Amino acid sequence: MARSRPSSETPRLSNRRRCLVAAAVAAAAPFVRAQANGPALRFGLTPVFLDERVRLLKQWREHLEAALGMPVAFVQRSTYAQVLDLLRAGQVHFAWICGYPYVLRQRELRLVAVPQWHGRPLYQSYLVVDAAGPAAELRDLRGRSFAYSDPLSNSGFLYVQHLLRGQGQDPGRFFARSFFTHSHRHVVEAVAEGLADAGAVDGYVWETLAELNPALTARTRVIHKSPDFGFPPIVAAAHVGAELLQSFASALFDMPAQAAGRAVLADLRLDRFVTAAPSLFRSIADMARGQGSAA
């Protein structure tokens, strides 16, 4: 079988879906650009989590600005690699990334906070398939098409690679075709719409979608759940001073005490943000080393 290399292209979705994406981007652009033009705290995000959540971003920005007493700009990029570039270049102060890029660049980043979900700062990777299909476990997906979220996603890429190698499989040859969607929601949509036979998705995102859009997740079926991993963290760039770092962390930790903060947490389906030690991501670092990544 020829080696399958994940494509970076997202499969073509419906015209209605593309219009919704364009509308969301257009709506978000003014407040992101306006704040970025002035002296603002810049917070990097990808669509991996906050996909088309314009109202939520506006609420979160307003809460952070009130808590910090300074403008806040959300700087959105398509991939974790692009957000890491912003952090390393000092173009953003903070970013919400994944545990995988965090362990790869841990010496250059500082751990600020981790979300708490259902009482724990943990989450899982889900393998999802067509709800009506016959697949019951990973080995049933040999020679099929597979959707990953991002090459630097733990739940959407690294864990599946680790799982396949643990079963004596070559991840580059196991699937007939694989591609990256750069959004966990798009992974679910790709499977639901038949653009992929299966996919790897953040369990928190799938469970949140099951609340917000049950008709979508009902078209998929979870056939495997990973062990628990440290929830994707919020990190600070190396250039951020101690005072700003502490102020930003406090604004996150104080969200349950503020009405605006509680509204954002409710929209995110999170309990709160909490402190964490780098050891929370040890299992991801172990998998990264197995992948041949420098952790």
Image (cartoon, helix red, strand yellow):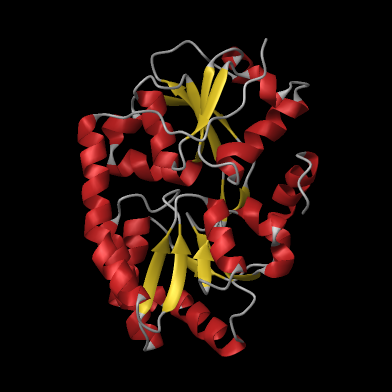
Q: In the rendered image, which quarter is residue 29 located in?
A: bottom left
Rendered-image quadrant of the N terminus: top right
Vertical relation: 123 (above or below) 226: below
Give the quadrant of residue 218.
top left
- Left or right relative to 13: residue 222: right
The image shows a total of numbered marks equal to 0
240 is higher (above) or lower (below) than 218 = below
Identify the residue at horizontal 36%, vertical 89% (top origin). 69
- Residue 180, x across and y down, in percent: 51, 35
At which x and y percent is residue 246? 55, 84
Q: Nearer the viewer, residue 88 or 182?
A: 88
Q: Please name whichever residue, 167 or 16, is drawn nearer the observer in this view of the structure.
A: 16
245 and 46: which one is in front? 46
Position of residue 233 in the picture relative to residue 285 (left or right): left
Query: Measured from the top left, where is residue 169 in percent x and y?
Result: 74, 21
Using residue 135 as the reference point, say whether residue 15 is left or right of it: left
Residue at (28, 38) in percent of width and height? 213
Q: Is residue 90 above or below residue 81?
A: below
Q: Is residue 140 visible?
A: yes
Q: Where's the C terminus, which quadrant?
A: bottom right
The residue sitting at 27% across, 60% down in the picture is 28
| 200 vs 170, nearest the viewer | 170
Q: Is residue 233 visible?
A: no
